[in-house]
Amino acid sequence: MKRSAVGWEHARQWFFWAWLAAVSLGGLAGCASHSSGPGASDSHADLVTNSDEPEARKRARIRLELATGYFEQGQTTVALDELKQAIATDPSFADAYSLRGLVYMRLNDARMAEDSFRRAISLNPRDANALHNYGWLMCQQARYSEADQAFAQVLTNPTYGDRAKTLMTQGLCQARAGKREEAERSLSRAYELDAANPVTGYNLALLLYQRSEFTRAQFYIRRLNNSELANAESLWLGVKVERRMENREAMQQLVEQLKKRYPQSKELAAYDRGTFDE
């Protein structure tokens, strides 16, 4: 499999973290006022509240809460079983389909994941989290135009609270599609909103390094490597940036960290071979 220049495939030690950062659970197990159902697509319709939520929806919501907990704990098949019961109880429950999409993504069943997200969006077109996750799924399938459209639609929602996450995910997808200028813009906007996200910082630094903008790359990678979130991948990128800028002392300090913290890493092996293009 060809290695991607940026994103989840390159940052292998952050793979699972990046996946969790890219997906959006939103308020799936939230209170009844966030409910979706018949009439949810009408922007003027009243939100469902605890006093008028149907009994079937209440039972389905309890199942969804259980499923969300199991999903977050990595018990994917148990979560799926709870979701099946939630949907059987209330087939119009968009949030259940949305989480089912994430479950099938984790199970690498793209067809069922897409069907789930489409059903969630059909039931509640205002669900920015479902749209975000649908865009992430499209990106994983190299359906970049559809992914970009989904992310753009999410970002037009004025009430959506995870803009940094969507901008980061959009940037990773644009980079994978070879749209590096667009990727840089998206990642830069994401960084402005959440500078502590290591996936954003790393991939922004990597893009700039690949464009030979070493001073700007240095800013982002140094900030990451000076935090507790540094890993072998980020240290190695830091080594390459400092080498390009002929900062031998800073470069050697990073090499020493690699030797001490990641003695068996492929990054240290690449340094020992002198293959800085890896």
Image: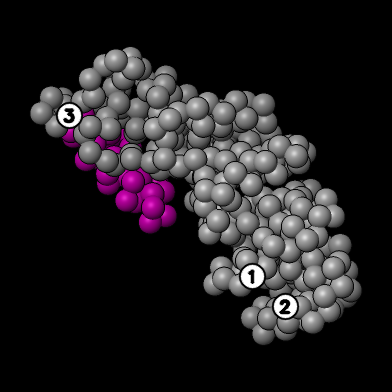
Q: Residue furthest right?
A: 274
Is residue 204 rendered magenta in the image? no
The image shows residue 188, relative to residue 265, as above or below, that is: above
Residue 140 left/right relative to 81: right
The residue singled out by tag 3 in the image is 49
Rounded to the nearest angstrom, the CA distance separating label 3 from label 1 is: 47 Å
The residue singled out by tag 2 in the image is 254
Q: Position of residue 206 (x, y in %)?
A: 74, 55
- The residue that appears at 42% across and 35% down in the rendered structure is 160
Identify the image quadrant of residue 79. Answer: top left
- The residue that appears at 80% across and 60% down in the rendered structure is 214
Task: Residue 225: give its label.
Answer: 1
- Give the magenta-colored segment's residue range: 57-86
Rounded to the nearest angstrom, the CA distance separating label 2 from label 1 is: 9 Å
- The residue that appears at 33% across and 39% down in the rendered structure is 28
Label 3 amino acid? Thr
The residue lying toward the viewer, choosing from 108 and 250, is 250
Name the chief secondary structure element in magenta.
helix
Numbered disc 2: secondary structure:
helix
- Counting other residues with Cα less than 10 Å from the Cα at mark 3, is it few (<14), some (14-19), or many (20 or more)? few
Q: Quadrant of the C terminus?
A: bottom right
Residue 167 left/right relative to 269: left
Q: Position of residue 26 (x, y in %)?
A: 38, 41
Residue 145 left/right relative to 255: left
